[in-house]
Image (tube, grey):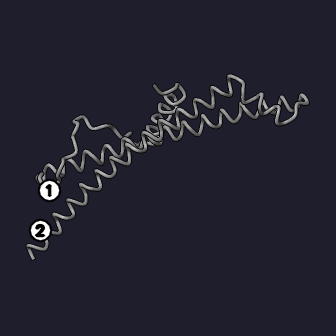
Amino acid sequence: MFNQEVLEFGQRSQNMLGQLGLVMPSRPNQELSFPNDLGDIGDEELGIHLSYWASMCSYALQKVAVLEGALILAKEKADQEYDLRLYSKTKAGMKITEARSLVNSTKSVRDLKTAVSVIEADLKVLKSVQIGYDLKNSAISREITRRSHERNTRNG
């Protein structure tokens, strides 16, 4: 599951959007499967799909933004911990290469770097899903445009 910092940042972003008077994108209540052939579905159903996949794009993009924000904060926290420990070791007279090695081997620095890596991995997965939703939304939009162009050509 997501670490506490990600969840806290998600809550912070939700509060920020509320203060700005912006509505948080929500996941649609009804779940739709992408049709095998867009040409086989009617115009009304195509409109429902467009609305659904646009909502999914918006929802997933907001979740990507939350993870990206949490990643920035996690990297900053890891960098600060590393820098403080490195400064302490070099101030005590340790050579920089020795100090780096020692600091990188501490549990707290390793744990923070692991947390950053987990967020980056989660972000990679979420971005791929978001791109998939965007591709589906674009395909539906193109189908609507194609049908509209076809109607205009037939009607004159």
**As drawn, is 32 to the left or to the right of 135?**
left
Instruction: Work out which residue is located at the far right of the displayed protein and give it.
Output: 93
Residue at 32 percent of width and 52 percent of height:
135
Q: Nearer the viewer, residue 90 or 153?
A: 90
Q: Which is closer to the viewer, label 2 or label 1?
A: 1
User: Crowding near pointer 1: few (<14 within 10 Å), some, many (20+)?
Assistant: few
Q: In x, y percent, where is residue 56? A: 32, 43
Q: Amino acid at mark 2?
A: Arg
Up/down of 133 relative to 76, above or below: below
**As drawn, is 9 to the left or to the right of 55?**
right
Residue at 21 percent of width and 40 percent of height:
32
Q: In x, y percent, where is residue 30? A: 22, 36
* Mark 2 vs mark 1, CA separation in Å: 14 Å
Secondary element under disc 2, as helix, strand or loop, is helix
**As drawn, is 139 to the left or to the right of 67?**
left
Up/down of 142 relative to 37, above or below: below
| Residue 71 image-quadrant placement | top right
Q: Amino acid at mark 1?
A: Gly
Instruction: Work out which residue is located at the far top of the displayed protein and give it.
Output: 107
**As drawn, is 113 to the left or to the right of 16?**
right
Q: Any mark on residue 78, and which?
A: none
Which image quarter is the C terminus in? bottom left
Q: Which residue is mark 1?
A: 39
| Residue 143 image-quadrant placement | bottom left
Secondary element under disc 1, as helix, strand or loop, is helix
Q: Earlier in the sequence, mark 2 or mark 1?
A: 1
Q: In x, y percent, where is residue 86? A: 79, 32
Q: Which residue is mark 2?
A: 151
